Image: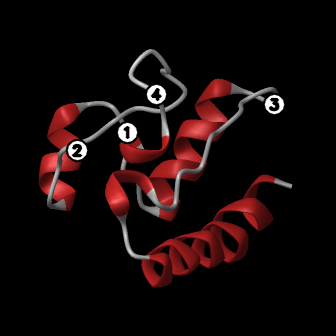
Amino acid sequence: YAAWQRPEQRSYQHSRATSVEALRSEGKYRVLTPEQCVELARAQGPLATFVHAPLCGGAPPALGWSSLRLYAEEVLPRLG
């Protein structure tokens, strides 16, 4: 994403992480299990919102699709 935007733009959280552990430690993104996501949503109440960034940190598209399916199949049904 950094290559697509001008230096003055800040519409994303740039990450230099090269592993899930590094991404978590940066604190820019939350990397959650479905259970953690459901717990967080319930704690925030009925107006909770999430921004799902399946390609954060330059993740491969296949991993992004897997993440989206996991969210759709294991998180959303438990919140409805």
* Colour scheme of the picture: secondary structure
Q: CA distance from mark 4 to mark 1?
A: 22 Å
CB under 8 Å between discs 4 and 1: no
Q: Amino acid at mark 3?
A: Pro
Residue 78 place in picture, x, y as percent: 74, 61
> On the image, numbered disc 2 is attached to which residue?
24
The answer to whether residue 15 is above or below residue 11 is below
**Residue at point 70%, 77% (across, down):** 73
Which residue in the structure is indicated by mark 4?
A: 6
Which is more N-terminal, label 4 or label 3? 4
Looking at the rendered image, the disc whose residue lies closer to the viewer, 2 or 3, is 2
Evaluate if marks 3 and 4 touch, with contact meaning CB atoms under 8 Å apart.
no
Mark 3 highlights which residue?
46
Mark 3 → mark 1, Cα distance in angstroms: 22 Å
Q: Quadrant of residue 65?
A: bottom right
* Residue type, numbered disc 1: Tyr
Find residue 72 and report its horizontal and vertical position in percent.
71, 70
The mark that comes first in sequence, 1 or 2, is 2
Give whichever of discs 2 and 3 has the lower sequence position.
2
Amino acid type shown at disc 4 = Arg
**Which of the two labelled residues, at mark 2 and mark 4, occupies the earlier sequence position?**
4
Write down the residue under mark 1. Answer: 29
